[in-house]
Amino acid sequence: MVGRRRQGRARILAVVLALLGIQLGWLVAPAYACGCGAMVPEASQQIAVASEQSVLRWDGRSEQIVMRLTVSGTAEDAAWIMPVPHRAAVRLGDPALFDQLGKAIAPVHRTRHYFWPRNGDWPFDDSDAAGDAAPPGAGAGVGVVDRQRLGPFDVARLTATDPAALDTWLREHGFTFPPRLRTALQPYVDQHWEYVAVRLAPQASGTPLHGALDPLHLTFASDRPVYPMRLSRLASLPQSLGLYVLAAHRMEPRTSIGGYAPKVVFAGRLGKPAGALGAMAEGTPYLTALTQEFPYPDRISGDHELRRTAADTPVRQVIYDDELREVAGIPAWLLTVGGAVLLVLTVVALIDARRSRRPETPTPEITPSTPLG
């Protein structure tokens, strides 16, 4: 028991040290990317993307992407860019969408009974155990489709035929990115993609970016579902992706694009959800929820292209709650063992009683014979 307790404390200490290491990593180096594009703060400031949630909806003709970032750090503003294959309409998304999705994919809890007592059950319970949040003009090679303010976002929709010109325009208009961005953008320029450049800045000056930001909702034409990931290769720290995919059928990434194999945490048809999820899922009722880790971002080789799976096999996580089997509040093992002991005692008592009631056979008396005279 003591050994197990020490092992448990050692595991907890290791987790705490790992988390502290991650936090220190954010302090010594800014975050140059998130799973959805390139993000950098101003010089000498830090920003950490604590979590990123994205929804991709594809109906065969158009695509919608809704992103919500939760950030922390000292940065008062930061820049982010998302390449898109066609011209995108941009608006603020509904935060309730992610709450509804979280409930839709929540694991199912099932009770699993066991017979014999385990550690923590009487008589093996540990009594010492204690239970311990009008747009500006563009330069040559760059076209400004639109620039607008959406909540904390300064959003510019751009076209470009020259990555150097795009890099220059972004820097001149307050969108600061690392020098390597010019090279990373070249494949998108070659494919004639467009760009949504976003500068994140709170409404009140002097206020660091913190907490869950308002979601951004992008809509654009697309004959194939794609989630831009190539720019995340600029990141200096491991990246993670959480992606909800709404389509007519179950979907999957064609390749792992340099990360660990994507994991499916949920797949299934939605019923008739209301609210933000109902509006988003209309015509695309099948939800696939994916997670993926990128321990080496520089190995990211492209964007996630999604395809239909061979079958719409449902997937749902199940959490088993183990409980000691009881009968009328009494452990079943105790009733069984107690009943067996009582049965044995009863049998012994019956045998003993039967023996005590059995009549005793009298011992014949031996009369001494009289000798003949």
Image: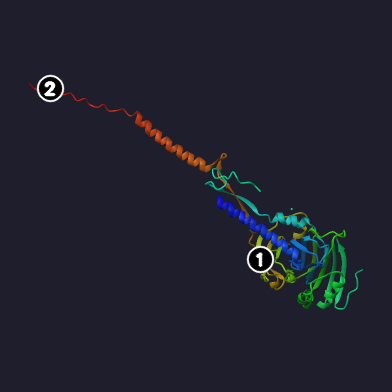
186 left or right of 6 in image: right
Q: Measuring from the top left, give residue 115's x and y in whole percent.
A: 53, 46
Label of residue 310 in the image? none
Q: Label 1, label 2: how many angstroms apart (C-alpha)?
A: 113 Å
The C terminus is located in which quarter?
A: top left
| Circle 1 crowding by C-alpha within 10 Å: few under 14, some 14–19, many from 20 | some
Q: Which residue is mark 2?
A: 370
Amino acid type, callout 1 = Pro
Q: Which residue is mark 1?
A: 262
66 left or right of 347 in image: right
Could you tell me if residue 303 is visible in this image? Answer: yes
Image point (59%, 53%), residue name: 6
Nearer the camera: disc 1 or disc 2:
2
Image point (77%, 64%), residue name: 65
Q: Measuring from the top left, give residue 116's x and y in whole percent.
A: 52, 46
Q: In terms of image quadrants, where is residue 255?
A: bottom right
Amino acid type, callout 2 = Thr
Q: Secondary structure at mark 1?
A: loop
Could you tell me if residue 247 is visible in this image? Answer: no
Q: Residue furthest right?
A: 134
Q: Measuring from the top left, give residue 352's x and y in whole percent.
A: 37, 32
Q: Secondary structure at mark 2?
A: loop
Q: Residue furthest top?
A: 373
Q: Residue furthest left?
A: 373
